[in-house]
Image (cartoon, helix red, strand yellow):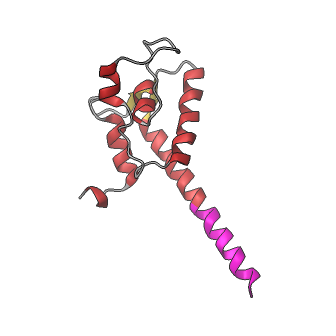
Amino acid sequence: SENETPREVRLLCTLVAGGGGGRTVAVDVAATRLGTKIHFDTDLDEEPPPIWLAQHYNKVSNEIVDEEEREMLRKEFHSLIDQFAMQLDVYDLVAGLIEHRRSKMQQATESSNGAASNTD
């Protein structure tokens, strides 16, 4: 079932869907699927074509990637664009997200343990 599939696997599948099964995806496709309207063939002040938005816009659900994580990924996309990168390695992107989630969980655990030891 969909709910049993790890969020990271669902993200990976959503980002590469329709791309021929490879591990690279266009930066504008990935960004748009995560809710940021970017289209390399459109001027910055123009809206991407309606067909583009219908195919890609906001296809990754909030259940898979929360708003704080989306912001982190948006920064990554803009960094790639600033470096004139047209493609990104989705495996590396998802690995970075997994590391971010682990770090966040570890910080929460340490904070929780610290609070518990202060009550002793």
Residue 2 vs 46, above or below: the answer is below
Residue 4 vs 47, above or below: the answer is below
Q: Quadrant of residue 72?
A: top right
- Which residue is at a point 44% across and 18% down the rendered structure image? 47
Q: Main secondary structure of the magenta part?
A: helix
The magenta stretch is: 105-120
Q: Is residue 80 left or right of residue 58?
A: right
Q: Is residue 54 magenta?
A: no
What percent of the width, then of the height, locates residue 26? 41, 25
Q: Is residue 56 left or right of residue 84?
A: left
Q: Is residue 115 magenta?
A: yes
What percent of the width, then of the height, locates residue 58? 39, 36
- Which residue is at a point 48% across and 40% down the rendered structure image? 93
Pick the front one: 85 or 34? 34
What percent of the width, then of the height, locates residue 118? 76, 81
**Where does the C terminus fall, quadrant-wise?**
bottom right
Q: Is residue 96 left or right of residue 117?
A: left
Number of numbered callouts drawn? 0
Pick the front one: 24 or 6? 6
- Which residue is at a point 59% across and 58% down the rendered structure image? 104
What percent of the width, then of the height, locates residue 101? 53, 55
- Which residue is at a point 53% across and 30% down the rendered structure image? 77
In the image as oriented, which residue stretches furthest toward the left?
Answer: 1
**Where does the N terminus fall, quadrant-wise?**
bottom left
Q: Quadrant of residue 115?
A: bottom right
Q: Is residue 14 left or right of residue 114?
A: left
